[in-house]
Image (cartoon, rainbow, N blue to C red):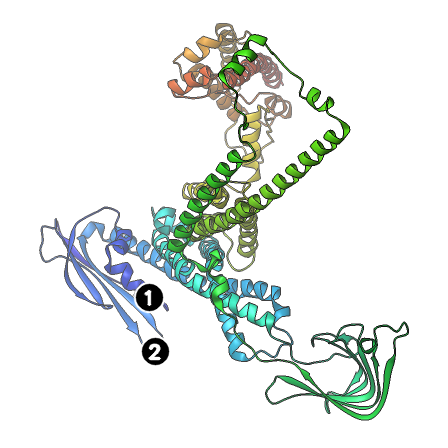
């Protein structure tokens, strides 16, 4: 057979060189290019240039296939050249195959470009949300740019793992929505490429993103969290820059309250100044009122230099004479007055040691080590507290009974005794002493156990926080892959690209994920749920959703069609559908009115015989229903097919009465009156589980009665149609 050499060229605009080379040179990347597994050897290779293979089972040693990539340095575009050998009559099929594979590669390129854009957008949104919480800690404190740059940098690093799932979801929705809107996805499916095969290179890429997310959480995240919270605490402790507002009291200077009525920002002068100095206490407060003033920072930024002009000073003198009822005061009028106020405005980093016990600053190995140590500690403390309780609160009586005492008690046959009788025979003083002693012992025991409970609860809280952090590193990484399996098939189903519908859908899905994940986290953290159950709740809910959407999209099943779900619900609930037939505008073939009456009579006879044979109006035997091996009823299926064929033929009529009568035919549920499953043993199991079996039993009984009524309805409708046909023929 004649062999033909095929040479193809494809333009891949702005494609990453590393991504393209990985796709054509590695075994993992090459698996997506071929439908079947074949062994090959590399004949020649040049990194980031070309690679040539030869099939080991190929009879012709001169044949090969080559993948070559060339780069235009001016436009940064790549041209992928493919060389292959095939039979002459299969050349077109091979070209279509390579075309579909290149389309898959283009999907990877499109997704990567959109992913980078959506990632930075999501990161920016999360950073703005984070900064909004701590904006009060930064405003008005004169922080230097390097401090703010560090804060933004470390906050961005900590928010990378949270941004990745949303970015992947949004990028997948937009990518596959664009392909669906431009019918590219439909074209690839028409070429025989399934959705899973289209998604395969992206799955490997998303798996890499999952590893990157885990690396950020386990390696970079703890260090960034330590730096970030150290900066936040330092910012909180830094004194603010002195920027006194107008018309309100300013209390950011320790020991002082300042009020300025008017302020000249050009000259820095303050007018109508009122100062409360309570450094020595409120009883010894100093009040200064001046017409104007000026406030300056010293060169070392450790003090404030206050200049006041034309004012008065009032000061209490109570501390000088404590025995006087009338408190003396001192009043001073001044033309110019100067004062120095301590005010440290330098930014000093606090010690990062306070983060050593925080779970967010530890990697998985450190978390696991601390979890093990805290479990051992709790067990040890618990055993110690148990021994103390058994030795003190719940200890046995000191005066142990002798053998003679026990024999006397046994011979007395004391079935019951009244403890209160011992208390009633005591004197009033004895009763008071007994009550006070009991109350004192109870309060002491309660205080002791409250303190011990607090110690245990503190350790338990820290233990749960460490365990939630350990699981969070896994769940948040896995969320990237789950969100991709939600976004990619959902984008193909919605078939809407751009930033409209995909953004709305992705935000809704992420909100649902956030609510479920946050609820599970709080339940696990507070000890209401088991830690692993709370942390994996979101994964357990969204993973089946991703699998369902992927399955539906891969099989081109209806997902977002409300009518499909309504019909399914009607089918489950047993709600009957109504037939709707309308007059056709164009009729090619008229019904055979001469033949139809005979077939209608025969259909009526068969329906009557079927109803009598099956005894549809009687209740079925419960045991024979589940023991019978017959999977379904072939007779009713054949009757339904004959009826539908007659209806389809008669729907071509021009007679309005006949068309109206056709709508009286029932829509038969041909499988609802028999066993629910086709598998024999599954039906047997259903019958053994009595509650489930009874549900299906009564449902089958109801549908048998309905089927019997349908048979009678078919017979009556057949008779009505025969009369209509007879009347129409006689006209």
Q: Position of residue 289 (x, y in %)?
A: 83, 84
Q: Position of residue 452 (x, y in %)?
A: 55, 44
Secondary element type, mark 2: loop
Residue 74 in the figure: left or right of residue 703: left
Residue 63 in the figure: left or right of residue 513: left
For image coordinates 48% across by 46% down, the residue present is 535
**Viewer-proximal residue among 326 and 717:** 326
Q: Quadrant of residue 61?
A: bottom left
Residue sticking out furthest to the right:
326
* Location of mark 2 (residue): 74
The answer to whether residue 549 is visible is no
User: Disc 1 and disc 2: Cα gap in Å?
Assistant: 14 Å
Q: Position of residue 148 (x, y in %)?
A: 54, 75
Foreground disc of the pair 1, 2:
2
Q: Is residue 32 above or below residue 52?
A: above
Secondary element type, mark 1: strand
For image coordinates 41% across by 59% down, the residue present is 111
The answer to whether residue 458 is visible is yes
For disc 2, the neighbor class at 10 Å (few under 14, some 14 to 19, many from 20) is few
**Viewer-proximal residue among 371 and 186:** 371
- Circle on res. 257: none
Residue sticking out furthest to the bottom:
335
CB contact under 8 Å: marks 1 and 2: no
Q: Is residue 494 above or below residue 665?
A: below
Residue 4 in the figure: left or right of residue 212: left
Number of callouts in the render?
2
Q: Position of residue 223 (x, y in %)?
A: 43, 64
* Location of mark 1 (residue): 11
For image coordinates 32% across by 54% down, the residue present is 100
**Viewer-proximal residue among 61 and 288:** 288
């Amino acid at each position: 057979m004649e062999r033909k050499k095929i040479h193809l060229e494809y333009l891949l605009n702005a494609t990453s060189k590393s991504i393209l080379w990985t796709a054509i040179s590695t075994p993992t990347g090459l698996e997506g290019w071929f439908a079947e597994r074949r062994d090959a050897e590399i004949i020649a290779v040049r990194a980031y240039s070309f690679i040539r293979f030869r099939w080991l089972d190929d009879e012709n040693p001169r044949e090969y296939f080559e993948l070559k990539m060339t780069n235009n340095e001016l436009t940064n575009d790549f041209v992928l050249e493919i060389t292959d050998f095939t039979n002459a009559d299969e050349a077109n099929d091979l070209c279509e195959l390579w075309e579909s594979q290149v389309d898959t590669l283009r999907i990877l390129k499109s997704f990567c470009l959109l992913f980078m854009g959506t990632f930075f957008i999501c990161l920016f949104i999360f950073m703005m949300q984070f900064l909004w919480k701590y904006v009060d800690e930064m405003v008005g404190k004169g922080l230097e740019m390097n401090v703010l740059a560090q804060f933004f940098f470390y906050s961005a690093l900590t928010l990378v793992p949270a941004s990745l799932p949303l970015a992947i979801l949004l990028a997948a929705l937009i990518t596959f929505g664009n392909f669906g809107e431009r019918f590219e996805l439909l074209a690839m499916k028409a070429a025989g490429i399934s959705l899973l095969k289209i998604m395969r290179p992206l799955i490997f890429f998303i798996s890499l993103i999952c590893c990157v997310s885990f690396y950020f959480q386990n390696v970079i995240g703890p260090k960034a969290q330590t730096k970030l919270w150290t900066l936040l605490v330092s910012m909180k402790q830094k004194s603010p820059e002195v920027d006194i507002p107008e018309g309100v009291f300013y209390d950011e200077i320790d020991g002082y309250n300042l009020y300025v009525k008017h302020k000249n920002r050009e000259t820095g002068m303050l007018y109508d100044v009122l100062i409360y100095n309570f450094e020595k206490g409120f009883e010894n407060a100093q009040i200064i009122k001046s017409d104007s003033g000026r406030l300056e920072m010293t060169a070392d930024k450790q003090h404030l230099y206050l200049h006041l002009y034309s004012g008065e000073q009032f000061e209490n003198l109570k501390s000088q004479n404590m025995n006087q009822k009338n408190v003396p005061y001192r009043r001073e009028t001044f033309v110019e007055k100067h004062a120095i106020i301590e005010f440290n405005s330098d930014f000093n980093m606090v010690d990062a040691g306070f983060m050593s016990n925080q779970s967010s600053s530890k990697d998985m190995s450190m978390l696991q080590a601390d979890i093990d140590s805290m479990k051992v500690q709790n067990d040890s403390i618990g055993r110690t507290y148990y021994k103390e309780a058994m030795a003190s609160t719940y200890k046995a009586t000191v005066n142990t009974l002798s053998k003679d005492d026990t024999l006397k008690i046994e011979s007395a046959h004391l079935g019951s005794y009244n403890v209160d009788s011992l208390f009633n025979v005591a004197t009033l003083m004895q009763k008071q002493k007994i009550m006070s002693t009991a109350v004192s012992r109870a309060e002491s025991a309660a205080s002791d156990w409250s303190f011990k409970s607090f110690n245990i609860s503190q350790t338990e809280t820290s233990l749960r926080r460490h365990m939630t952090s350990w699981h969070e590193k896994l769940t948040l990484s896995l969320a990237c892959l789950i969100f991709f399996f939600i976004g990619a098939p959902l984008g193909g189903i919605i078939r809407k690209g751009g930033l409209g519908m995909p953004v709305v859908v992705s935000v809704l899905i992420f909100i649902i994920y956030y609510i479920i994940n946050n609820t599970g986290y709080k339940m696990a953290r507070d000890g209401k749920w088991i830690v692993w159950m709370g942390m994996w709740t979101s994964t357990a809910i969204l993973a089946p959703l991703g699998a369902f959407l992927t399955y539906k999209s891969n099989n081109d099943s209806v997902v977002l069609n409300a009518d499909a779900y309504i019909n399914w619900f009607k089918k489950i609930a047993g709600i009957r559908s109504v037939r709707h037939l309308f007059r056709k505008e164009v009729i090619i073939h008229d019904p055979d009115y001469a033949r139809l009456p005979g077939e209608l009579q025969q259909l009526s006879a068969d329906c009557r015989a079927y109803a009598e044979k099956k005894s549809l109006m009687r209740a079925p035997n419960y045991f024979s229903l589940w023991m019978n091996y017959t999977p379904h009823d072939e007779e009713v299926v054949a009757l339904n097919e004959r009826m539908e064929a007659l209806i389809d033929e008669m729907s071509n009529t021009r007679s309005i009465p006949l068309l109206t009568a056709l709508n009286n035919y029932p829509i038969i549920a041909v499988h609802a009156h028999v066993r629910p499953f086709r598998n024999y043993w599954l039906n047997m199991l259903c019958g053994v589980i009595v509650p489930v079996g009874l549900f299906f039993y009564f449902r089958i009984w109801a549908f048998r009665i309905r089927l019997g009524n349908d048979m009678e309805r078919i017979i009556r409708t057949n008779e009505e149609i025969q009369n209509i046909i007879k009347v129409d023929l006689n006209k």
